Image (tube, rainbow, N blue to C red):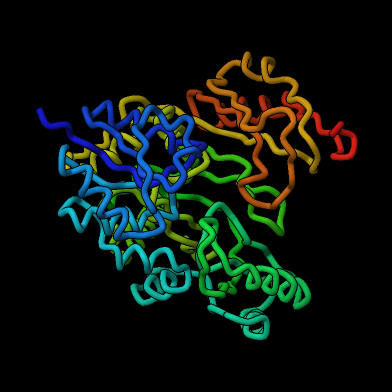
Amino acid sequence: MTQDVLVLVESNTTGTGRLFPRAARELGLHPVLLAADPGRYSSVGGAEVMAADTSSTDAVIDACRSIGAQRRVVGVTTSSDYYVGTAAAAAVALGLPANAPADLAAVQDKGVQRRLLLEAGVRVPRFTVAGTVDEVLAAAEEIGYPVVVKPVTGSGSLGVRLCANPAQAAGHAGATLARGHNERGRPVPLRVTVEEFVTGREYSAEVLNGVVVGITDKHLAALPLFVEAGHDFPAQLAPAEREAVAQAATAAVRALGLGLGPAHVELRTGPDGPVLIEVNPRLAGGWIPRLVQEATGVDLILETVKAFSGRASHVYATIRGGAAIRFVMADGGGVLRDVEGVTEASGLPDVVDVEIYRRPGTEIAVTGDFRDRIGHVMARGESAARAAAAAAEGVRRIRPVLAACEEVPA
């Protein structure tokens, strides 16, 4: 009997990425993970790991065809933002379900994405794409301070900063433009977006196959950074506001050609209604898919694997409740000696999961993005508000113990 294979092109090594192989096996598929460095994946949910040059689309296609010579490849996907286009190109080459690689490339360039949304009549912040500090300053002057300056590519709040004046804009833009490489180590265009700062609450719409599954309330740490400190699902919105957010997200996904699989759509509710901040052609990070499952019974990871392996995907809520997560953050840098209070937090009513990501002895550096998270507390309740209170109380019980680097014996 021929084995049906789901190919994963790289994977997130933390968060829900490691759950994709489990979902594949639940559907009777054998997960094969293509990785440039198989040693990174000591635990990826039991997937078979094969070495491949994942920086090359042609090499990934060749690897998929090699697998297909003896087994049947029924889908190609990824849990990593940086390999979405590669996975789609491989799927198209093999005649498998995928969004158009050209559409995905446009979505992953925030400047191009914004232009397409604007042309489609979707409300977005005023913005300019800039390649030099002088262009950044000119754009900021025209838009009006404060402005948000961020790279045209990337995720996880990397390089995103609110700049209140020309000195801050010049300093942040200069440092960002000087990097010139993304998280995969590849050269990238030296460009940033300079955009209007939209006040108002921030939400994300979780979309599958063009349909909004639910809306997440996002909790951000203190400005000028945009670190996501927690999430509540479902967001507590008035019916008219919920409908407006869902309509904006649906219009955005349609305009960008993301009709298959997941999309994570970030919005802010400005004084004139929802404003699209950005669309990501993937599942949400920050354990949001787990929150959706805890609150509704819908397994977005399983449904995503169905979508990209040609299976019918139908999303039906089987329970009605709320879920929330709060992240454990270190107050400053140093070497992690211990994390106290984990057992105490785990025993709280409504808390369903406590996890610490960093081991004792790990050096902690505050970077102003998702890497500042060192753990989480997740809760489930009869409402999102009740779950949020439990998760927040759990984080209050947890105490990271840090030592200055020079205090740690060599």
Count of numbered marks: 0
Residue 130: x, y in percent?
A: 57, 80
Question: As drawn, is 310 to the left or to the right of 246?
Answer: left
Residue 202: x, y in percent?
A: 55, 53
| Residue 306 visible from this viewpoint | yes
Question: As drawn, is 308 to the left or to the right of 271?
Answer: left
Residue visible at 73% across and 25% down?
339
Residue 114: x, y in percent?
A: 44, 71
Residue visible at 66% across and 36% down?
374
The extreme right residue here reads 407
Residue visible at 39% across and 30% down?
293
> Which image quarter holds the C terminus?
top right
* Closer to the camera in the image, 251 or 76: 76
> Which image quarter holds the N terminus?
top left
* Closer to the camera in the image, 349 or 170: 170
Image quadrant in which you'd find residue 332: top right
Relative to 371, does residue 256 appear above or below in the rendering?
below
